[in-house]
């Protein structure tokens, strides 16, 4: 498999990385229907940990079975499938080599008390990723949490180990916690800041939420106003977040968020494409739909990222 010019250009941005990391990034970028384009669609299924089984899978009970998600990602022609360890283990043999996987190595849950600092437990290791043949580890950080520095230190160490063993690192960077207001979780200044933090922590792929035009930090507002930074449209805000990731030299994918209508998903994808983002990581907006609808939605997204729609 020869890397395309678009993929080779992306890989050239990762100076100093081990050949194994670049090989696994190439593996994901060359997989599926978007293979070779520099764009990505990833299926993440860690919501069972985050929200519980009924909230995650009752709308489409087939999703209780981890094999369903493997097969959905394969049949849809996606670039990768991300999930916690036991979910990947449940199909690691059956689906070995059929789609790149991302091992989610930390997780939270909705049973924590509202007074607890926003945090996640480490539930898997780099060696687990090697054992099941994963291309990358995935790790969530919460910029704004009172324990965010602990999370930063954890991923720096895991990222160093993963790189030494040829495994790439994906960071979910979600502003959340005591230092962030509810509106601030998706504010443009905070979202771009979170993306930049992930880049500085060494993420090879950065996952963030789409942002609003709200600005949470007063000091940031002064700069946005003085420099006339365009945040008026979703496309402009995507571009700003991509710029925050080393001027677009890191792969940036955007979360699909809570379940919503198909047209909203497509509008988001067009904004991501036009703003220079690398793609979407869509969970509930896919696996909570009937399989046929999910497959059609993914095909439509592929067409959007290829510039056909």
Image (tube, rainbow, N blue to C red):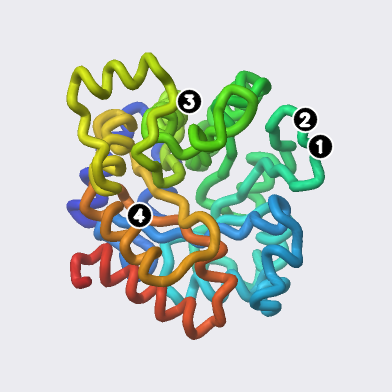
Q: Residue at x 55, y 30 (%)?
A: 181
Q: Which of the pair 132/81 is nearer the observer? A: 81
Q: How far apart are the alpha carbons under marks 3 and 4?
A: 21 Å
Foreground label between 3 and 4: 4
Question: Counting residues from the N terminus, which is met first, the one under dot 2 or under dot 4?
Answer: 2
Q: Position of residue 248 (x, y in %)?
A: 26, 36
Question: Counting residues from the N terminus, which is met first, the one under dot 1 or under dot 3?
Answer: 1
Quarter of the picture containing the N terminus is bottom left
Q: Residue at x 59, y 71 (%)?
A: 288
Q: Residue at x 53, y 33 (%)?
A: 175
The image quarter containing residue 262 is bottom left
Q: Which of the pair 110/78 is nearer the observer? A: 110
Q: Position of residue 289 (x, y in %)?
A: 55, 76
Q: How far apart are the alpha carbons under marks 4 and 1?
A: 34 Å
Vertically, is 253 above or below 217?
below
Kindly tell me whether residue 85 is visible in this rendering. no
Locate residue 242 relative to residue 58 in the image: left or right.
left
Q: Which residue is mark 1?
A: 113
Of helix, strand and loop, which one carries label 3?
loop
Q: Residue at x 38, y 29 (%)?
A: 215
């Amino acid at each position: 498999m020869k890397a395309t010019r678009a993929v080779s250009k992306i890989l050239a941005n990762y100076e100093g990385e081990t050949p194994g990391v670049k090989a696994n990034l190439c593996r994901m970028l060359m997989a599926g229907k978007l293979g070779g384009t520099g764009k990505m669609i990833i299926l993440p299924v860690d919501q069972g940990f985050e929200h519980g089984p009924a909230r995650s899978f009752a709308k489409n009970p087939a999703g209780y079975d981890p094999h369903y998600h493997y097969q959905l990602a394969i049949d849809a022609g996606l670039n990768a499938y991300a999930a916690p360890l036991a979910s990947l283990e449940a199909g690691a043999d059956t689906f070995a080599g059929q789609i790149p996987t991302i091992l989610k190595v930390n997780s939270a849950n909705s049973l924590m008390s509202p007074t607890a600092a926003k945090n996640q437990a480490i539930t898997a290791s780099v060696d687990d990723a090697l054992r099941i043949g994963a291309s990358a580890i995935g790790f969530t950080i919460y910029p704004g949490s009172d324990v965010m520095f602990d999370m930063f230190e954890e991923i720096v160490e895991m990222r160093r180990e993963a790189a030494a063993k040829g495994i790439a690192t994906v960071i979910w960077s979600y502003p959340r916690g005591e230092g962030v207001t509810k509106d601030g979780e998706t504010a443009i200044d905070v979202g771009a800041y979170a993306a930049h933090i992930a880049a500085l922590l060494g993420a090879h792929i950065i996952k963030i939420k789409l942002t609003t035009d709200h600005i949470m930090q007063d000091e940031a507002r002064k700069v946005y106003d003085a420099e006339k930074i365009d945040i008026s449209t979703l496309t402009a805000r995507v571009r700003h977040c991509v710029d925050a990731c080393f001027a677009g030299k890191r792969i940036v994918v955007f979360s699909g968020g809570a379940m919503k209508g198909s047209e909203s998903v497509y509008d988001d994808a067009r904004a991501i494409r036009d703003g220079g983002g690398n793609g979407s990581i869509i969970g509930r907006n896919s696996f909570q739909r009937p399989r046929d609808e999910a497959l059609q939605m993914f095909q439509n997204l592929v067409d959007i990222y290829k510039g056909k729609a």
